């Protein structure tokens, strides 16, 4: 034993005379503890990467030997050796360990197999809760996903007519609450700050709309949501509605941001002849007409509407009736394009082609109560233009649509079918591209014809 201990000595630990005298008195366990400490010190000294741990080991106090034995009456309890210091392992560099190394206790499958399909949980959960600000989906049938935006007093009243028909994706924007139509819920109305109306000042109107274009865009995104087509309605004589061209870039950006595949289509009104005598109103109308000239748009002639309704409706109900009739006319085009026909269909792609044509569109309808007339084809075409609330077309159009709604008896009559072909030819000869559709319904007051000619 002394020879073994002597061989383990190092420069950090030397025997003293006291150690030699007490070695014979120490128990075997005390001596083993000392040898363990000496061996640990030697290992630390030989490992230059653990200098900090070595310093801690050097400063650790050596256990003191008992000064005197316990009295004979109370035998001394054996002293337990101090715990040996835990061996210090060399530092390890982090290694790249594959995740799928553990094995599940239940089935023994590799976790890596489940990691390959961890995307399932991401798509399997419940969808995000519906935004409380989002307006409900349109109840009115339509072949295209669309929304309606009314700007200013006149545009707001026209937009309300579509809202009343079930196009709930409708928003009214104005600079004053005084022009808010009665019966429009607050969630369908957006008041722009900066002016309590603009007093037919189109410059001020464009300034206010331009400064609040981000608010309009955000309202469309949070309340209307995802649609493909946006119909914008405005009056041509006021200051706010006539300034709606200032919103065009924001409206296009909105459609792109929601993934809309359609365009912005404008529906504007032309003031009556008496209103156009006012220079301010005339200037505002000319400005709006210029702003939308290159965009798909429908122009409603208020003078023509007054002539068609004069004697039928009182002054108080004239414009509400005109707006309602126009909204129902547009609704029939959107609705028929969504329906199947046993004869010939006008589908959604045809409708998108017509609506997307740049320039002015003319829309009208008529009814032929006597289908036995030989010139019924010309009557239907001329009747649609005559009863249209739009100004008469000029020149050749790019696209044309003729939709006919007949009863089962008309559809079964060979002579009527021949005359209907003449109606299609009248429209086709005046347009570069013709779309047509024949639908069978009952009861009807007669043969219904609806025409849309665009690209003037």
Image (cartoon, grey):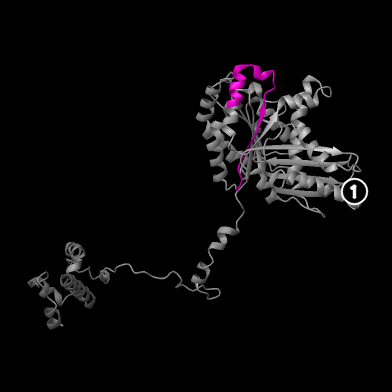
Label 1 Cα crowd, 10 Å radius (few <14 / some 14-19 / many 20+):
some
Residue 144 visible: no
Q: Position of residue 280 (x, y in %)?
A: 59, 18
Apparent side of residue 444 relative to residue 218 in the rendered image (left or right): right
Which residue is depicted at the point 76% across and 28% down? 322
| 145, above or below 247, in the image | below
Task: Give the position of the C terminus as an image quadrant.
Answer: top right
Which residue is depicted at the point 20% across and 66% down? 50
Q: Residue furthest left?
A: 17
Query: Residue 224, located in which quarter of the rendered image?
Result: top right
| 281, above or below 223, in the image | above
Query: Residue 189, located in which quarter of the rendered image?
Result: top right
Query: Residue 59, located in which quarter of the rendered image?
Result: bottom left
Q: Position of residue 170 (x, y in %)?
A: 67, 36
Task: Find the magenta span and give its range.
Answer: 261-286
Secondary structure of the residue carrying numbered label 1: helix
């Amino acid at each position: 034993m002394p020879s073994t201990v002597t061989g383990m000595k190092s420069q950090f630990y030397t025997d003293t005379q006291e150690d030699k005298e007490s070695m014979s008195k120490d128990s075997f366990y005390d001596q083993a503890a000392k040898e363990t400490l000496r061996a640990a010190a030697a290992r630390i000294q030989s490992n230059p990467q653990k200098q900090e741990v070595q310093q801690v080991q050097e400063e650790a106090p050596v256990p003191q030997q008992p000064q005197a034995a316990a009295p004979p009456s109370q035998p001394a309890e054996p002293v337990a050796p101090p715990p040996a210091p835990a061996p210090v392992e060399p530092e390890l560099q982090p290694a790249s360990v594959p995740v799928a190394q553990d094995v599940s206790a239940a089935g023994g499958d590799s976790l890596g197999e489940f990691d390959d399909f961890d995307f399932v949980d991401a798509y399997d959960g419940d969808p995000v809760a519906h935004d409380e600000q989002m307006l409900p989906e349109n109840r009115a049938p339509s072949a295209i996903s669309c929304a309606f935006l009314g700007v200013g007093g006149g545009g707001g009243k026209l937009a309300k007519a579509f809202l009343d028909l079930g196009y709930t994706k409708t928003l009214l924007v104005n600079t004053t609450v005084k022009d808010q139509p009665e019966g429009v819920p607050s969630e369908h109305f957006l008041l722009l700050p900066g002016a309590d109306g603009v007093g037919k000042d189109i410059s001020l109107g464009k300034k206010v709309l331009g400064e609040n274009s981000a608010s309009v865009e955000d309202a469309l995104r949070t309340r209307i949501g995802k649609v493909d087509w946006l119909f914008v309605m405005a009056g041509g004589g006021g200051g706010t509605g006539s300034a709606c061209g200032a919103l065009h870039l924001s409206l296009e950006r909105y459609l792109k941001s929601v993934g809309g595949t359609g365009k912005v289509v404008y529906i504007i009104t032309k003031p009556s002849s008496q209103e156009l005598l006012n220079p301010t109103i005339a200037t505002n109308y000319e400005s709006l007409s210029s702003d939308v000239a290159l965009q798909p748009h429908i122009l409603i002639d208020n003078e023509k509407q007054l002539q068609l309704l004069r004697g039928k409706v009182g002054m108080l109900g004239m414009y509400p009736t005109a707006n309602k009739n126009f909204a129902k006319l547009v609704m029939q085009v959107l609705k028929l394009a969504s329906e199947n026909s046993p004869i010939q269909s006008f589908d959604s792609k045809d409708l998108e082609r017509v609506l997307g044509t740049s320039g002015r569109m003319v829309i009208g309808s008529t009814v032929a109560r006597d289908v036995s007339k030989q010139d019924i084809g010309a009557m239907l075409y001329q009747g649609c233009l005559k009863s249209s609330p739009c100004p008469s077309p000029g020149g050749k159009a790019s696209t044309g649509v003729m939709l006919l709604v007949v009863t089962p008896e008309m559809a079964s009559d060979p002579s009527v079918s021949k005359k209907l072909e003449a109606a299609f030819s009248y429209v086709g000869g005046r347009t570069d591209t013709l779309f047509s559709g024949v639908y069978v319904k009952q009861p009807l007051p007669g043969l219904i014809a609806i025409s849309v000619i665009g690209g003037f």
